[in-house]
Amino acid sequence: MVMRGVLRSFGGAIAPARSRDAAEPAAAPVSGTVGDAERLQILEALEESGVAWFWSTDSENRLNYLSRSAAERFAPLSGAQGILLVDMLEAVPADGQDHAERPLSFILGARNRFADLVVRVKSGAGDCFLSISGRPYSDVDGNFVGYRGSATDVSDSYERQRDASRMAEYDSLTGLANRHRMGVRLTAILTAYKVAKRNCALLMLDLDRFKQVNDTLGHPAGDELLRQVAQRLQRIIPTTAEIGRLGGDEFQVILPDMDDRGRLGELAQRIIQMISQPYSIDGSRAIIGTSVGVAIAPFDGVTPEELIKGADLALYSAKAAGRGQYRFYSNELKDSAHQRRTIEEDLRDALAEEQLQVHYQPVVRSADGNVSGFEALLRWEHPEHGWISPGVFMPIAEETNLVTAIGEWVLRKACVDAAQWPGDFRVAVNISAIQFMQEGLCGVIANALASSGLPPTRLELEITEGVFMGDSAEVDRTFDQLKRIGVKLALDDFGTGYSSLGYLRRAPFDKIKIDQGFVRGCTEEGSSNSAIIAAIVSLAQALNMETTAEGVEAMDELNLVHQRGATHVQGFIYSRAVPQDQVLEKLAGGDLAYKPCGPEHYRAERMTLLKRVGVIHEDHHYQVTLRNLSRTGAMIEGLLHVPKGAQLVLDLGEGQLAVGVVRRSHEATQGLEFETPLISDGADGLCTRHRVSPYMLAAAGMPLRALPPGQYQLPAENAVRNSHPRFLQVEMSAFGKG
């Protein structure tokens, strides 16, 4: 009987079996007073008790015996005789591991003894875990005849152990990996990938305006918001990635085998869009945003410390640029971080030293081309750094609690200046969400109007949808007070955030401003922006509101927004923002008309850079000046005798190589068309999708490290060696060119 053979394996007093483990002799009898029948009864009682069971396999590791009580207790094992053991059981991973170190098939194939191996019973109904031990047996001729072993049910203890391990590695609030697990995973991945020469991307993100949700709705609401954010991330991030919450409102994403910055930029943008959608929490509406920093190994770092620091710097840059954006790491960010600290220190003195100025951009009526008002735009002329963009210093002002003081100064200054304009032209002033939520805002506005003598109807407050994330009752009271004062209200950047029609119902807006993002490229074939503009205008008309199309620069854009019915237009096509003295000069002359002046057609922005870059041709490396850059091409100067059709490689630095063909060549200036279009770097710049791998540079003799800044000679495997330079490099004064 099979049972007797199994019992011979575990009952040392039973007579030696015909087949035994050759590595271990039979045990000596413990007692001579218990016979085989009695021993069989004892072991059968042990089986029936459920404390332990016995099993055995044949030479093919198919089950040929299993204790009856085990088969009855675990439905998937009933009738399992003859089934391969690996088809019924699978090894489970040890603590902290995602996969078992060795699968059961490997263990059985090695024909070694094993003890206390935790396995899962393969079943569609719940998890059952066993601890099994077994040893191989051979016949008298040394031929393997199968395994014999025992098993115990450890489901309860394994579940408790697994729960304890999970608590140590996962965030109890969101269910995502915690900081400890993310650190271990990143270290393990980078160590393995360095050997395999693979890449890995790291995304760092935190939530914008999360603190305001905690402050206005309470910490339980903040916890629920974090849970919903985690769920949204799990829906849009690939399953191959690991998502973690590091603490507070900080999240991290590890993306193995990902270095395509085009795909990473698209993913970052989807994350920003998804996180920015409104949340419903216990009947309240919460609105937040997020910023994302991206670093990629081995390009931006080969150690966890380097990669995390790079992603942190990129996230810092995204937040400093106005939030709701993403950034890729670059070596330039180190200098940007230092510059930001300098700006933060100097901004505190800018107000007192009268470095801040208010310029005014005209808002023109579509019907007659006459000016109807001006938007007040803040400018900062730094004594050392010159003009600094509001997109750079205003996010810093928000973080350092200077935005309220600066906002009040702009409001008072705009009212004083507008009071000097002849006629009834409006002045539009931006009110930040932080400023809107400050107590006493209405008193500040009333005082500014009274001290300047400006009628309330000539002041237009531009407000973004971000104000609606605060306490709804308080927001409604503020709007009621503003309308009682008599000022005009405009909903700014409509369509770029949450675009809830409930805002238009709750707040008594007089105007909707169409964001320049919809104007830009609205005439391009296949663009849906034209339809979006038409929809916004129709909505405004139905609600008896005016509309202003922002950022109009080209004649075809102007014609389209006119056709779609926008009542006002604002943009470079009419004028940039100008100082107060130029506004007074324009209005004093009585000429209220603005003549549009701009290119006939919209074209993708070309960035004027005037920077030194490298050009590779065959095995020669030249230095040229990059005059402008677009997604599809570039203009360079500094080479003579370059024919049309020549293939050049533009070395943009940090491993960025753009292959291009010369389409225009005149003297020392060439126009290149790229073989593969560049992509957005998340800021105002462009970058290549892929970069030269540091593994390739290491193979050529360079140390394995993050890509160095600037240009450097790269190995050219197929270049014509020892050839003469085809082109003549000349020095030119790039800044002296027109």
Image (cartoon, rainbow, N blue to C red):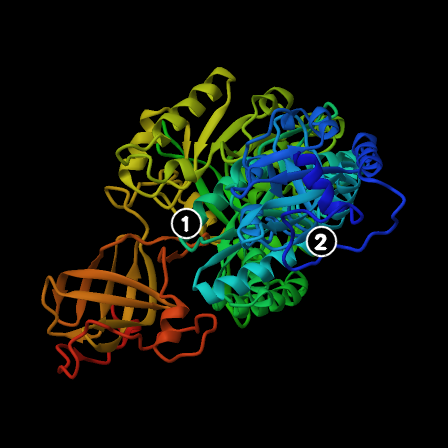
Q: Is residue 486 left or right of residue 197?
A: right
Tag in front: 2 or 1: 2
Q: Tell which of 606 and 435 is nearer to you.
A: 606
- The residue where tag 2 is placed is 401
Q: Secondary structure under badge 2?
A: loop
Q: Quadrant of the N terminus?
A: top right
Q: Residues within 10 Å of mark 1 (few under 14, many from 20)?
A: few
Q: Can the viewer see residue 575 in this picture?
A: yes
Residue at 40% of width from left, 44% of height from top?
Answer: 589
Viewer-nearest residue: 83 or 339: 83
Q: What amino acid is found at the position of numbered circle 2 in the picture?
A: Asn
Q: Quadrant of residue 434?
A: top right
User: Measured from the top left, where is residue 154 in percent x and y?
Assistant: 76, 39
Residue type at tag 1: Arg
Which residue is painted at 43% across and 64% down in the image? 197
Q: Are marks 2 and 1 in contact (CB under 8 Å)?
A: no
Q: Residue at the location (46% across, 37% down)?
A: 515
Q: Which residue is mark 1?
A: 576
In this rendering, the count of numbered labels is 2
Say which element carries label 1.
loop
